Image (spheres, helix red, strand yellow):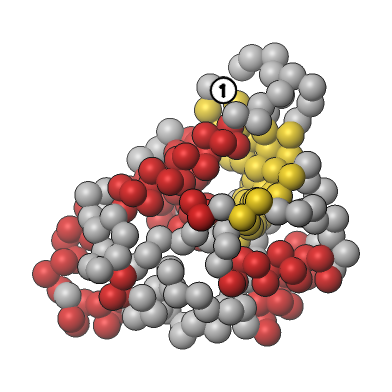
Amino acid sequence: MTDYMPTRLFLLRHGPTSAPPGCFAGSSDVPLSAQGLVRLDNIRAQLKDADCWYCSPMLRTRQTLQHLRHLKFKVGEPVYDERLREIDFGRWELQTFADIAAQDEELLPAWNQYLDFTFPEGEAVAAFIQRVEAMLAVFSGMETSAGTNTVAVVTHGGVIRTMICLALGISPRNYLLFDVQPASLTVLDLFSEGGVLRGLNL
């Protein structure tokens, strides 16, 4: 490693939402559930003050950030960035896997291959990975010799899983290896040579 200190990312997944259980909620702007707000109380001891904050512009992440303020976290004015949005599942939004298999069974093999897949009427996986990679480059560029930069990011499960893979040099096709729970923290240290996973589901 170099003499430079890393950028430490605190990646906070929003709390549980009001979306139906087991469904795919990506571009759908669903709010947090009451349970979602309660579960955020559990991260009080883990989330440290950050030098800067970034947030997905979606309702569930903005509500998460607002609740942190109610809990007296020191939250500066966040940078809202479209690249931190969850992937757009297109016509599969708010449907379960069983629903999807029933109506689009022929698309399942291509979805399983993942990297070259485009969700029907939705986003291409390659485009999603590209924008997450662009955000990771922004955070990696904050590396400094003056000390550790701490960046808090309020975003989505798919974004966090993909960012872990990219930081660790793992193919994003393996994103499901990381089970990122709602209202949990993932901690990544970013060096110029790559990332180190310091914590998952804190």
Find numbered disc 1 in the image and state the secondary structure of the residue it sits on: loop
In this picture, residue 79 sits left or right of residue 160: right
Q: Residues within 10 Å of mark 1 (few under 14, many from 20)?
A: some
**Viewer can see residue 45:** no
Image-quadrant location for residue 88: bottom left
**Viewer can see residue 193:** yes
Residue at the image position 74 percent from the left and 40 percent from the top: 150
In this picture, residue 91 sits left or right of residue 136: left
How many labels were placed on the picture? 1
In this picture, residue 40 sits left or right of residue 27: right
Residue 63 at x, y percent in the picture: 67, 72
Residue at the image position 84 percent from the left and 68 percent from the top: 71
Q: In this rendering, is residue 180 above or below 59? A: above
Residue at the image position 40 percent from the left and 61 percent from the top: 87
Front-most of 80 and 150? Answer: 80
Image quarter in which the N terminus is found:
top right
Q: In this rendering, is residue 19 above or below 113? A: below
Residue at the image position 17 percent from the left and 58 percent from the top: 110
Q: Residue furthest right?
A: 72
Residue 75 at x, y percent in the picture: 80, 56
Residue 111 at x, y percent in the picture: 23, 60
Image quarter in which the C terminus is found:
bottom right
Image-quadrant location for residue 40: bottom right
Q: Amino acid at mark 1?
A: Ser
Residue 39 at x, y percent in the picture: 70, 73
Q: Residue furthest left?
A: 106
Q: Which residue is mark 1?
A: 192
